[in-house]
Amino acid sequence: MSVQIDLKDRKAVVFGIADDRSIAWHIAKRLNDAGCRIAAAYQERAEPSFLPMMKELHNPVYARCDVVSDELLDSFFKKVKDEFGEVDFLIHSIAFAKKEHLRGKYLDIDRKGYQTAQEVSAYSLAELARRTAPMMKDGGSIIAMTYIGAEKAVSGYGIMGVAKAALESGTRYLACDLGERRIRVNAISAGPIATLAASGIANFGEILVNSAAKSPLKRNVTADEVADCALFLCSDLSRAITGQVIHVDAGYCITGG
Ligand SMILES: NC(=O)c1ccc[n+]([C@@H]2O[C@H](COP(=O)([O-])OP(=O)(O)OC[C@H]3O[C@@H](n4cnc5c(N)ncnc54)[C@H](O)[C@@H]3O)[C@@H](O)[C@H]2O)c1
């Protein structure tokens, strides 16, 4: 398939690259291949897999960051401002909940577990948008990653489903807050993909089998297919689209179970 989208001279901030299975990595590669420079943030624990991958990008900027640390956020965004000056895109592809909270019932989540999941997975979209928007001088596109567990109760996804519901709602409010500045904010609701984060979900193997069996296209999706949608949302082809949750899930979300 040959699609020409030119993002030459554009710049993207990307959060969420842990290894080469990360959805954020596939998005970063797609945008980079289209000519866009990438500023990537990585968590310390991902460093061994993250650093060698940067050699595959053209002229990237990267630094350690964690969305729960103001100090690391300040230094990351200072680096982005110093190196890029202006930014066009923000990719938010991060989520976190303690493993034990992804294995039990939502009923049993304690306050701290709830706060952590919400802070990292949902609040951080507003935090990153607030820090990136002033650099989006000529409009921009912000993309978050979500999952059907925000809309329906998916067994084993409890706490993260609640966080994703906040993320999706946040997408709509941010779209309203930033629309006047021609900054669009959308979320991609991806079908299940075997990544590091997905391995924390207790019955993920079952979820993969079910979604392939029930989706109209009778298959699962790939991270590259999600990245194609991100490329579209960064391009002018999507210039009238904001505040949306776009499903890239082989149609699974339309089925009745
Ligand atoms: N894999 C799937 O099936 C699937 C489906 C739909 C949506 N998603 C979403 O896609 C996004 C990316 O996940 P993935 O599947 O590529 O897994 P992944 O493990 O590769 O990526 C998750 C990323 O979140 C980052 N992260 C976690 N806590 C952080 C923090 N405090 N500060 C900064 N970064 C932090 C990790 O370093 C990692 O890079 C997540 O939002 C996830 O919920 C995944």
Image (spheres, helix red, strand yellow):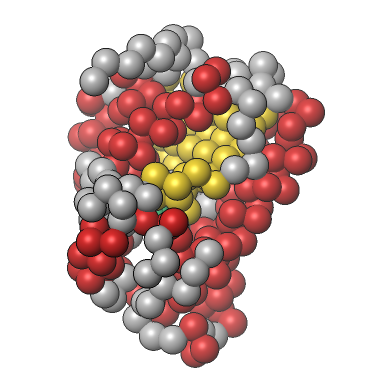
- The residue located at (22%, 51%) in the rendering is 219
Q: Position of residue 102 (x, y in %)?
A: 38, 76
**Direction from residue 237 to residue 1 in the image, left or right:** left
Q: Residue at x 49, y 83 (%)?
A: 106
To which quarter of the image does residue 8 belong? top left
Place of residue 144 in the rendered image (x, y in percent of width and height, measured from the top left): 51, 45
Where residue 177 sits, quadrant-wise, is top right
| Camera-nearest residue between 238 and 170 | 238
Res. 82 visible in picture: no
Determine if residue 254 is in view: yes
Q: Which residue: 23% across, 71% down?
A: 206
Q: Quadrant of the C terminus?
A: bottom left
Report the side of 18 relative to 13 (left or right).
left
For the point 55% across and 75% down, the residue is 114
Quadrant for the N terminus, please: top left
Q: Is residue 13 above or below residue 177?
A: above
Percent position of residue 91, x then y: 48, 38
Using the image, determine if residue 48 lies above or below residue 54.
below
Q: On the picture, is 240 further left or further right than 13?
A: right
Depth check, front residue: 243 or 58: 243
Q: Position of residue 23 (x, y in %)?
A: 33, 44
- Towards the viewer: 50 or 195: 195
Say which of 136 and 41 sits in front.
136
- Figure check: 41 above or below 197: above
Q: How many marks?
A: 0
